[in-house]
Amino acid sequence: EVQLVESGGGLVQPGRSLKLSCAASGFTFSDYNMAWVRQAPKKGLEWVATIIYDGSRTYYRDSVKGRFTISRDNAKSTLYLQMDSLRSEDTATYYCATQRVLQWCSDYWGQGVMVTVSS
Amino acid sequence: DIVMTQTPSSQAVSAGEKVTMSCKSSQSLLYSENKKNYLAWYQQKPGQSPKLLISWASTRESGVPDRFIGSGSGTDFTLTISSVQAEDLAVYYCEQYYDTPLTFGSGTKLEIK
């Protein structure tokens, strides 16, 4: 059974940093691209970033480029999102999700972790 | 960026009825080399994570009931639920994965009368 378990969320002040983790199990982690997708309270879904299966390339939405860093450790089957210079508009539930290599829709999702940016 | 427009924003139907919802993209999602439409549909039930229902505009994921039907090509897509069940109460999102940034529609909320 595929499992994705996010952790590391919480309340953080604007301008500070936070690092999310996503522990994967039940599938061959290194065979999949991985993504972070977020959802602000009562809002829709917003893609944040994708990392290629071998970590060779990363892709970001413009609003987080230069502030967020997606990374992965295939030996630990873990995905990360380093979030720096956080803004109030980054407040959201962050989901990690698998993406097939040739098909970038997200087929498995974690339960999500809440990040609140507020003073 | 490719803009995804979903209509209606909400819809209320009775169990057993057929429902259709629309998703339009600001540019074609049909890739000429493989003739595939890079369009997915997701279901998000209250308090849950999204679930992938359909990829390539019309391919149902394993385990998804056959009452969920995806159709369309190019810029116009439709999700049809042939006979709505009470458990289909959810918000449905379309997503284009033709190009980054990947973009979602704003969702159609399905309510059961």
Image: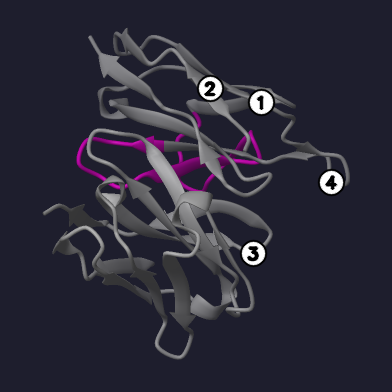
Residue B33 part of the magenta-drawn span: no
State the separation of the CA atoms marked 1 and 4. 20 Å
Could you tell me which chain the residue with mark 3 belongs to? A
- Residue A53, quarter of the rendered image: bottom right
Q: CA distance from mark 4 to mark 3?
A: 16 Å
Q: Between tags 3 and 2, which lies in front?
A: 2
Residue lying furthest bottom in this view? Answer: A75
- Label 1 belongs to which residue? B26
Looking at the picture, which amino acid does disc 1 mark? Answer: Ser
Q: Is residue B44 magenta?
A: yes
Q: Residues within 10 Å of mark 1 (few under 14, many from 20)?
A: few
Magenta stretch, overall SS: loop
Q: Which mark is residue A101?
A: 3
The reply to whether dot 2 and dot 1 touch (C-beta < 8 Å) is yes
User: Compared with residue A24, is residue B113 higher up or lower down, i.e. above or below?
Assistant: above
In the picture, measured across the screen, residue A56 lies left or right of residue A84, that is right
The residue where tag 4 is placed is: B34
Is residue A97 visible in this depiction of the protein?
A: yes
Q: CA distance from mark 2 to mark 1?
A: 8 Å
- What numbered label is drawn on residue B5? 2
Residue B39: image quadrant is: top right
Q: Earlier in the sequence, mark 1 or mark 4?
A: 1
From what the image shows, is residue A68 above or below residue A79? above
B48 with respect to B65 (left or right): left
Q: Position of residue A72 (x, y in %)?
A: 46, 79
Q: Amino acid at mark 3?
A: Val
Question: Vertical placement of A85 versus A31: above or below?
Answer: above
